[in-house]
Image (spheres, rainbow, N blue to C red):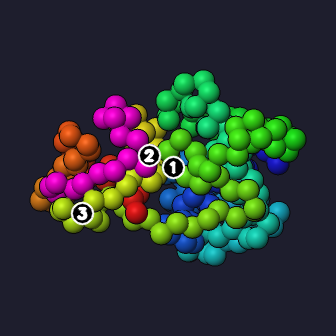
Amino acid sequence: MTGSKEDYLRAVYKLSESVTPVSNKRLAEFLNVSPPSVSEMIGTLSKEGYIEYKPYRGSVLTPKGSEEAIKILYNHRLWEVFLANHLGLSWSESHSIAHELEHISSSMLTEKLDEYLEYPVQCPHGFLIPRSGEVENRKLRPLSTLEIGESTYIRSVEEEVELMDYLQNLGIDINMPIVVKNISAYEGPVTLQIGEREIQISFKAAQRIYVD
């Protein structure tokens, strides 16, 4: 399977976590490609049995497609752990490079990498690493849905390069305890207490951070 096909399967899987079926328009935006390119690739993947396309609605992965997408996620997240924890790369750097390395198809290499890393539970920005052919669904909620005064833990952040850089520059990390101190009106900044300091993050960022 080509790297381009794997990118599409991974994208459909990720987008399906919030909305399903996944529209061609949403895929084009997520992958930063043209709508005609999406239509062509979805047609190909549908013929090969990886995707079921529903006209005017979008795409869903078949069991065959889900199995392949989960395999790609497994590879990707292991490489992120190696690059971030052992080479000292940032979340965004490790994510971008792992996107290239995830297409290496050697199962032996992946298994050896997993063993070397001592079987990590999650990637650096909080997503679980699948090993049994399934991704465990955690009941997390966006930080933006919390009320003032609520305390919780940050568990994961979306795989967006600018977002990851933004949060790391603010000193935000996974499994960090936080308290919501204030939420400004009209989707204004959200004020968080982290230890003895208070920081403000944009409401847009709060929508992409997931907590208990």
Q: Quadrant of residue 164?
A: top left
Residue identifier under label 2: 174
x 21%, y 66%: residue: 147
Q: Are marks 1 and 2 in contact (CB under 8 Å)?
A: yes
Q: Is residue 51 above or below residue 5?
A: below
Q: Are marks 3 and 1 in contact (CB under 8 Å)?
A: no
Where's the C terminus, which quadrant?
bottom left
Mark 2 surroundings: few (<14), some (14-19) or many (≥20) residues within 10 A: some
Mark 1 surroundings: few (<14), some (14-19) or many (≥20) residues within 10 A: many
Of 206 and 156, the residue lying toward us: 156
x 30%, y 35%: residue: 170
If you read the primary sequence from the N terminus, does the residue marked by circle 3 or circle 1 appear first?
1
Asked if residue 34 shows in the view, the reply is no
Q: How many marks?
A: 3
Residue sitting at the far top: 87
x 71%, y 41%: residue: 118
- What is the x, y in percent for residue 148? 18, 62
Mark 3 surroundings: few (<14), some (14-19) or many (≥20) residues within 10 A: few
- What is the x, y in percent for residue 193? 22, 47
Residue identifier under label 1: 126
Residue range in magenta is 167-183
The verdict on residue 175 being magenta is yes
Residue type, label 3: Glu
Q: Is residue 204 above or below residue 135?
A: above
Asked if residue 139 shows in the view, the reply is yes
SS for callout 2: loop
Of 142 and 185, the residue lying toward us: 142
Residue identifier under label 3: 150
- What is the x, y in percent for residue 131? 73, 56
The verdict on residue 158 being magenta is no
Q: CA distance from mark 1 to mark 2?
A: 6 Å
